[in-house]
Amino acid sequence: MSEIPSTTPKPRVLVADDEQVIANTLAIILNQSGFEARAVFSGEKAVEMLDSFQPDMLISDVIMTGMTGIEAAILTRERLPKCKILLFSGQAATADLLEKAREQGHEFEILAKPVHPTDLLAKLRS
């Protein structure tokens, strides 16, 4: 894994997943790979963090209790239009939620869970 040169500010990544182990593990991997990553465990928390953390990218699970990752992504895009958004899910219900968002004019990229760290890093760097 190539490191990002320290002369440039590290890209800030916010990871949202209600499975704390997944969110924390992704944040650790990203931090070790030259990003500044923070983990939160709900869509609501992700939206709360937008103003203080100002992420360059949001990586969110789609299906979470309370606010879904898609709802968090839509609010993120409204507040931080330059923030890249990457959603991931291991559940079939995701397709319906994505279709609903698409009908409202929101297009999001989605990865299937489990996401291999190498694939995730490749996506983040592309």
Image (cartoon, rainbow, N blue to C red):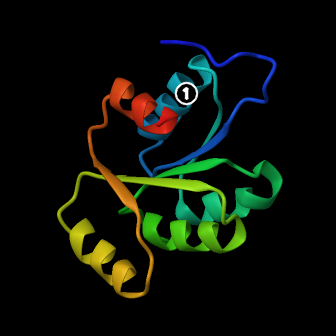
Q: Residue 46: x and y, percent?
A: 62, 58
Three-letter amino acid code at disc 1? Leu
Residue 95 appears left or right of 110 = left
Q: Residue 22: x and y, percent?
A: 42, 37
SS for callout 1: helix
Q: Which of 102 and 32 is in front in this view?
A: 102
Q: Which residue is drawn at 78% across and 26% down?
A: 8
Residue lying farthest left? 92
Residue 71 appears left or right of 40 = left
Tally of numbered tags? 1
Q: For residue 69, what is the image quadrant?
A: bottom left
- Density class for disc 1 (Cα within 10 Å; few <14, some 14-19, many ≥20) is many
Compared with 56, 7 (above or below) is: above
Is residue 68 visible in the rendered structure shown here? no
Residue 117 appears left or right of 37 = left
Compared with 95, 5 (above or below) is: above
Q: For residue 3, what is the image quadrant?
A: top right
Q: Residue 85: x and y, percent?
A: 51, 55
Is residue 21 visible in the rendered structure shown here? yes
Q: Label 1, on which residue? A: 30
Residue lying farthest bottom? 104
Residue 53 appears left or right of 95 = right
Q: Residue at x 71, y 63 (%)?
A: 48
Q: Residue at x 33, y 55 (%)?
A: 110
Q: Which of 122 and 59 is in front in this view?
A: 122
Q: Residue 87: x and y, percent?
A: 40, 55
